[in-house]
């Protein structure tokens, strides 16, 4: 079970093992010494790596043997062909990943929870283009930079288009005049993701890729905040993750106003209730789906008085919806936003009022080692962050790493996001590699899979398992990551236990199938 006791996540086996090994060593002849020393080091490293001390039953051992045989085969093949997907840009690697048998296994694997995803980066964009933009009463305008803005309205929008946008045009009329609609739709879809054939050239640096990334959220805002689309977007997102064998999500949500066809708008309370209702209905129809929680989020670039206001809103939402609203986060690019320290007065407000508002801060999503941006990682802990979003820089901060270990505060690792947003190019060099090697608390998540051209959680699991974990990461590592996603969720202990028992049944099915798989 998840609370207390000698649970599957105990770390206490290492010492006795090492003592035993030392005794055995003392009796070795000098000839065997080299082999022994080498073997002991290998064992020690295996025991230290993430999940290294996880017990596997007989069937799991058999499944692991199958999995590792396939994994080793793919490593050998990569060395031969010089094409190793985790070392390539995801936009080029995706097709190769989809051919990988290891990937197919990871897709089938019940993956527990996705704890770091953002509200409108979750669902593959095709549906927005091929269904939503075909709906009646959709208008658009064009900003001087060629960014489309959408608005559903009936009667036609009476308000002027947003500043500097062209006049509103009815999409239905516009499509009638388009010469090649297939081509138009393909181009539209392309503007809804970052996917590109030549990402290194299209996105020469982090500034460019972040500007495009932000523009996508801006572009789709008018579509996804239309009430009927909003509801269906949530439902379809849950469907896409469920299909990918993910049973629970914690969603960073901005909770912007949602509008109706006649221009009426709904506030954040309505949005939270809607998330809650849609998730509840979804759980009724999908066996073993646990549900969702929201982490209300605001943009870190805002000033302290606005963030103070948002912290107040977060407190009131948390008080009103304690089971749905898990807490608060600051989102947006760290390099160009304000630091956590800058916002400390706002962030200390709940504690001053004796109110417990859990935090889930993005921190350390930067390449600027040692700068004020990098200090976010230091500030996340004293500000009582429950988990750390990304924690990309943690391996360079021994004191933070050590505190995060002892306080049991995990990092939420999103490999594809880090690569697409240009923090690291070859995922074998992802700094979390060294943390995985020592079993640092962590979970894997996918941030904004739809915008990165991924889907659900499996692609990120693949990158973590093959690239960041290296060849030695095995079923134990995977099992540990999954159990971590349950353990470090914001669910109550009772809910975690229920989730864990349901997951165990699916895991056993998965293992039985994998153990029989011919290699
Ligand atoms: C969009 O999908 C819904 C089902 O979710 C369907 O009823 C509707 O006809 C579709 N609309 C268009 C324009 O394709
Ligand atoms: C329209 O564009 C698509 C995709 O670019 C292309 O395959 C198709 O042949 C075009 N159709 C016509 C009628 O030109
Ligand atoms: C904070 O930003 C808002 C919006 O930009 C602005 O109206 C307000 O005056 C700012 N407050 C302070 C104290 O700077
Ligand atoms: C963090 O937790 C400590 C101990 O519970 C508390 O004293 C402190 O006020 C908290 N800080 C914040 C920013 O919530
Ligand atoms: Zn994020």
Image (cartoon, helix red, strand yellow):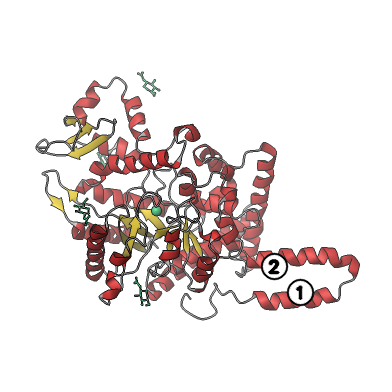
Classify 10 Å Cα crowding around label 1: few (below 14), some (14-19), many (20 and above).
some
* Label 1 within 8 A of ligand 4 by Cβ: no
Q: Which mark is residue 180?
A: none
x and y, in percent, of residue 270 in the image: 19, 58
| Chain-order first, disc 1 or disc 2 | 1
Q: Depth check: 246 or 281 in front? A: 246
Give the SS element for disc 1.
helix
Q: Which residue is mark 1?
A: 21
Q: Are marks 1 and 2 in contact (CB under 8 Å)?
A: yes
Image height check: is 87 above or below 509? Answer: above
Q: Depth check: 497 or 417 in front? A: 417
Give the SS element for disc 2.
helix
Q: Depth check: 50 or 387 in front? A: 387
Marks 1 and 2 sit apart, C-alpha to C-alpha, by 10 Å
Q: Which residue is mark 2?
A: 44
Image height check: is 363 above or below 6? Answer: above
């Amino acid at each position: 079970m998840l609370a207390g006791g000698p649970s599957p996540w105990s770390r206490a086996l290492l010492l006795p093992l090492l003592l035993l090994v030392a005794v055995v060593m003392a009796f070795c002849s000098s000839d065997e010494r080299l082999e022994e020393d080498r073997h002991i080091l290998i064992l020690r490293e295996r025991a230290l790596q993430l999940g290294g001390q996880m017990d596997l039953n007989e069937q799991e051992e058999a499944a692991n043997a199958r999995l590792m045989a396939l994994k080793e085969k793919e490593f050998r093949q990569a060395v031969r062909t010089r094409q190793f997907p985790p070392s390539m840009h995801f936009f080029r690697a995706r097709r190769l990943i989809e051919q990988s048998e290891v990937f197919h296994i990871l897709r089938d694997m019940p993956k527990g929870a996705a704890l770091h995803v953002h509200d409108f980066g979750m669902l593959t964009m095709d549906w927005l283009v091929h269904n939503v933009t075909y709906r009646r009463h959709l208008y658009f305008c064009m900003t001087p930079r060629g960014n489309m803005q959408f608005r559903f309205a009936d009667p036609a929008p009476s308000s002027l288009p947003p500043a500097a946008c062209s006049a509103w045009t009815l999409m239905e009329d516009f499509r009638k005049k388009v010469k090649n609609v297939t081509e138009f739709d393909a181009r539209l879809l392309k503007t809804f993701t970052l996917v590109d054939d030549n990402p290194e050239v299209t996105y020469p640096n982090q500034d460019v890729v972040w500007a495009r990334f932000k523009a996508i959220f801006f572009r789709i805002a008018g579509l996804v905040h239309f009430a009927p689309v909003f509801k269906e977007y949530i439902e379809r997102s849950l469907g896409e993750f469920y299909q990918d064998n993910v049973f629970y999500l914690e969603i960073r949500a901005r909770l912007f106003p949602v509008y109706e066809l006649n221009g009426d708008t709904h506030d954040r309370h309505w949005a939270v209730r809607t998330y809650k209702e849609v998730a509840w209905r979804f759980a009724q129809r999908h066996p073993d789906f646990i549900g969702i929680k929201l982490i209300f989020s605001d943009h870190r670039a805002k000033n302290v008085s606005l963030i103070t206001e948002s912290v107040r809103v977060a407190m009131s939402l948390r008080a009103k919806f304690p089971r749905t609203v898990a807490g608060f986060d600051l989102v947006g690019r760290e390099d160009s936003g304000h630091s956590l320290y800058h916002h400390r007065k706002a962030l200390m407000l709940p504690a001053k009022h004796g109110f417990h508002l859990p935090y889930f801060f993005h921190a350390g999503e930067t390449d600027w080692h040692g700068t004020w941006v990098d200090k976010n990682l230091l500030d996340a802990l004293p500000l009582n962050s429950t988990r750390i979003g990304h924690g990309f820089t943690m391996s360079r901060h021994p004191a933070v790493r050590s505190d995060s270990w002892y306080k049991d505060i995990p990092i939420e690792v999103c490999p594809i996001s880090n690569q697409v947003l240009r923090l690291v190019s070859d995922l074998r060099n992802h700094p979390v590699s060294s943390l995985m090697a020592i079993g640092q608390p962590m979970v894997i998540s996918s941030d904004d899979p739809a915008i990165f051209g991924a889907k659900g959680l499996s692609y990120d699991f693949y990158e973590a398992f093959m690239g960041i974990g290296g060849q030695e990461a095995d079923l134990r590592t995977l099992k540990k990551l999954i159990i971590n996603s349950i353990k470090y969720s914001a669910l109550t202990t009772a809910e975690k236990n229920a989730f864990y028992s349901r997951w165990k049944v699916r895991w056993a099915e998965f293992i039985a199938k994998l153990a029989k798989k011919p290699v």
